Amino acid sequence: MLYIFTATYYEASAWISRYSLKRDTSVSRFQVFYNEQENIRVTITGTGMVSAAAAVSSICTAVLPGKQDFLLNIGICAESPDGQGQIGELFLCHKITETVTSKTFYPDILYRHNFKEAELLTGAKPFQKGMWHRPGFFVYDMEASAIYQAGSYFFSPHQMVFLKIVSDNGCGDRVTPEQVKGLCALHMDSVADYASRLCTIGRVEKGQDFLWDGAVVDKLCCDMCCSATMALSVKQHIIYCQLAGVDFRAVIQEMYQAGKLPCRTKKEGKRCFEEFRQRLL
Amino acid sequence: MKSFANDYYSPFFSHIYVEEAVKGHRRTKRILERFSNATVIEIAHYKDVFCRKGQDAIRQGNSQKLVLAAKRGTLIYPGAAVCHDFGNKHFYYTSCMMNCIYGCEYCYLKGMYPSGNIVLFVNLEDYFEETERMLSNHPVYLCVSYDTDLLALEPVAGYVAEWVRFAQGKQDFHMEVRTKCADRTFFGRADPTSFVVYAFTLSPQAVIGAYEHGTPSLAQRIACAKEAAQKGFAVRLCFDPMIYIPGWKEEYAAMVDQVFGQIPAESVKDASIGSFRVPQDYLKKMRRQEPGSAVAQFPYQNIGGVYQYPKALSGKMEGFLAERLNKWLPGRKVFFWGDFSQRDV
């Protein structure tokens, strides 16, 4: 699933209309829109770090992400006054610095993309020219560091993606809701394409996951009268054999046919397991 | 779908993280020049990137990033009990690079490090200084390529050549460079010296194919070791770790025949044998990270905090290989990983 977090509704509206997202009325603290078929869940966090962290924590606790899922934080940002960016330009953030604590966070950029990259500063106040002196180009928002920190309880660094669209350079011009919608819509195609690639990656990698045969292990452990420790060892043997292509089922079958299974006592079970182990390796 | 799966990761070293303190260092500049298309990200300390929580080292291995940093604190460590000392009393190792470009499924680094990225420490002179200090007290046998494969990254880092230059003319200094690399160009350029041993880790091709991802084939490694030996370099053959696979006897027997069919036994300095073993905490982490890896999921036995093959199996495997090697090498040239718990390190 793609967990999208935006600070305002205007930053989310392009997603809502493109994927025909429906309001999730079971969530009352935050506005959540979803489409089960598309596997997308968009949450409006509200502005600022505390709201953002609360929203990520709340949504991810309710719908627990897996290894194949991604978190996407998208929204508008300011750029450094001496910056090289232009209004409307989109950046993928490879470094997030929280101005209040000076802590830095590094989302992993493992997957190919066509975006420009930049460092992102997250502050507690809206950006104003002159409030932050530092060399080099950066973009500035008010949520990302909190989203990263809250998100890291649920996602690996490579599963978190931060995309920011420059809306101003802190010179005091008010950005209207319509402008925000327009800026986000401007990049919707390229971001949706990237998001779709991430979802495909998630599916491909999930398809490579190893699924072990739990039912066989449960029955065997029961029939061998296993203690908890011995059951773990039986499980480990079965997992290994399944992965290494060793035909453990034939060995089990032969032991049933020979009347060695099921066992009646723990002592008998231990002997049986020892024979099982020796025949496998 | 297959082509997509091969294509979606960013290229190797697409991003290079550089500690602020070393951004002006000549080695940093040289490496950044080589990767001029890389995105360079400034960091305060390598641990800010390398030690982040929740990293997926396996996926990171598909798109490794490089971290350039300065190592502070301890630079040289006493040799670990689970490693061969080859009869050297003052056995040490050092890690001027952390992690490896190869993706061996059984590698303990996956259990040891929180990240799959590579850290290269550019303050090599500090390592040399520390070695000099130790040499003023006693002889030193130093393994410079343990938690990494330095020779595999030689075209980028050039660290083996620098260590060899440092070692020249030093009394009582011996060095081992362990590798799975088969880059013969290094041996074409470097001068052979008796105090530097190049230790080639060899495995049957079936093990390489199944578990040693991205490494040169057995034939390539043999060809490289052969050329090195022919040119007078001290060559060690490391049959360590021995990995159990169904049909292991035939595979290891064929490997020994292949090795000594090409490398004259008398040109080999020595050899080591050791079945796979790994500290318990590392294996737990490896199993979490690689749930689909047969070699990580093997039902090892925990003996004294070290997971290893059951005694009977490891004895059989090591004994078999020793017997095969003894046809080619005298017993005094073959070293075993023995009862580490009783060794005085």
Image (tube, coloured by chain):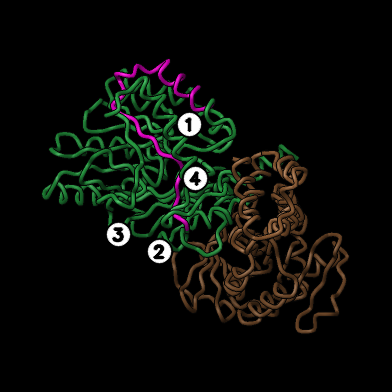
Chain colours: A brown, B green
Q: Position of residue B168 (x, y in %)?
A: 18, 34
Measure how far apart labels 3 and 1 are at the Cα level. 35 Å
Front residue of A135 and A202: A202
The residue beneath circle 2 is B44
Mark toward the start of the polypeptide (2 vs 4): 2
| Residue count near mark 2 (Cα–Cα under 10 Å), binned few <14, some 14–19, many ≥20 | some
Q: Which residues are magenta?
A: B251-280
The residue beneath circle 4 is B309
Q: Is residue B66 left or right of residue A3?
A: left
Q: Looking at the picture, which amino acid does disc 3 mark? A: Arg
In the displayed structure, B273 sits above or below A169; it is: above
Measure how far apart labels 4 and 3 are at the Cα level. 37 Å
Instruction: Specify whether disc 1 shares its chain with disc 2.
Output: yes
Dot 2: element:
loop
Q: Looking at the picture, which amino acid does disc 1 mark? A: Ser
Q: Position of residue A119 (x, y in %)?
A: 53, 62
Chain containing the residue with disc 1: B
Residue drawn at x 44%, y 59% as measured from the top left: B42
| Residue count near mark 3 (Cα–Cα under 10 Å), binned few <14, some 14–19, many ≥20 | few
Q: Is residue B105 left or right of residue A42?
A: left
Residue drawn at x 65%, y 62% as measured from the top left: A163
Q: Quadrant of the C terminus of chain A?
A: top right
Mark toward the start of the polypeptide (1 vs 2): 2
Mark toward the start of the polypeptide (1 vs 4): 1
Front residue of A35 and A123: A35
Dot 3: element:
loop
Q: Residue furthest toward the bottom?
A: A29
Chain containing the residue with disc 2: B
Residue B256: say if magenta: yes
Label placed on residue A217: none
Label placed on residue B72: 3
